[in-house]
Amino acid sequence: MPLSRRLGAELLGTFWLVLGGCGSAVLAAAFPGFGIGFAGVALAFGLTVLTGAYALGWISGGHFNPAITFGLFVARRIPGREVIPYWIAQVVGAIIAAAVLYVIASGKPGFAIGSFATNGYGDHSPGGYSLLAALVCEIVMTFMFLIVILGATSSQAPGGFAPLAIGFALTLIHLISIPVTNTSVNPARSTGPALFAGGPALEQLWLFWIAPLIGAAIAGYVFPLLAGIVAPSIEKPHIAAE
C-alpha cells in the first residue's frame, strides 16, 4: 500500500479516535439526565479503536497513536523511516478532530472550554494525583497496551480478533486511569485538545508524550524476548488481522 494512502488512513483513524473518545467526554460524560460517566467514556475510546482498526487497519495498520507506532518500530514491525510521517499524520488528525469538537461544543449557550478532555497531573488530574503517579501510570498503561497489541497482531494469534482485544484493552486502561490522568497513552490524543484548552494542558503536555513513548519502547523490546523472537524481522504493520 503506498505510504500516502497509509498516512491518510492514519489521519482519519486518529481523527475518529479523538472525535469519538474526547467527544464523549466533552459532550456526553456529564450531560444532565443522561451523563455516561467515566465508564461510558472508557467504552467510547475502546469502540473508536475497535471500529477504526477494522475499517482502516488493513490500509495503514491502524496505529492511530504515535506511541503504538514507536513501539512497533522498536519491535521491528515497521521501518524507522515511516515513524515521523505516521506521527505527523496522527497529530494532524487529532488536531482536526479537536477543532471539529470545539465547533460543536461551542454551539451550546454558556459554553466554557474547561479542561476540554485534556490530560493532566497535580491540580489538573481528575483525582488530584501527583506528577510521579501520572508518570508511572502512563508508562505502565502504555506498556501493557503495546503488549496486547504486539501479542494480538502476532502471526501466532488467532486471525481477525486483534481489534477486539485492542479495543477492550483500551477500555480497561481508561477504566483504571481516567481518575489519574484522564488517560492519554496516546500523544496525539493529548495534543489535539491541549492546543484548544491551552494553559496547564499545554504546560503538562510533555509528560503525555514522554511517558507513553517510554512505555511503548519498553514493550517493543520486551515482547520479542518474551515471545522468543531472537532477531525479529520487519512485518506488515497491521493491527487489524487480515
Image (cartoon, grey):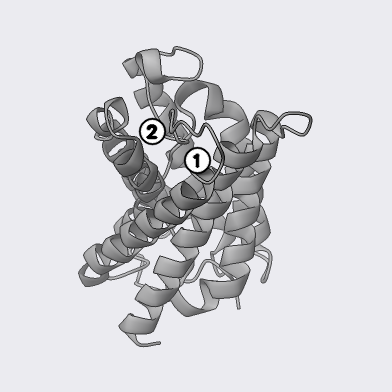
Point out residue 23 in the picture as x, y percentages from the top left corner: 56, 46
Few, some or many C-alpha atoms within 10 Å of disc 1 (few <14, some 14-19, many ≥20)? Answer: some
Q: Which one is nearer the viewer's eye here, 129 or 92?
A: 92
Instruction: Name the image quarter holding the C terminus.
Output: bottom right
Separation of residues labelled 2 and 1 (CA atoms):
9 Å
Point out residue 160 in the picture as x, y percentages from the top left corner: 67, 70
The structure residue drawn at horizontal position 52% and vertical position 50%, both measured from the top left corner, is 104
Q: Which one is nearer the viewer's eye here, 28 or 205?
A: 28
On residue 193, the disc is none
Q: Which one is nearer the viewer's eye here, 43 or 33?
A: 33
Q: How many marks?
A: 2
The structure residue drawn at horizontal position 39% and vertical position 59%, both measured from the top left corner, is 96
Point out residue 156 in the picture as x, y percentages from the top left corner: 59, 66
Could you say whether the residue bearing mark 2 is in a helix, strand or loop? helix
Q: Is residue 87 left or right of residue 115?
A: left
Q: Is residue 157 above or below residue 134?
A: below
Q: Amino acid at mark 1?
A: Met
Residue 177 in view (yes/no)? yes
The structure residue drawn at horizontal position 79% and vertical position 29%, both measured from the top left corner, is 33
Q: Residue beneath label 2, please?
A: 139
Q: Amino acid at mark 2?
A: Ile
On residue 144, the disc is 1
Residue 230 in view (yes/no)? no
Q: Is residue 150 above or below residue 234?
A: above
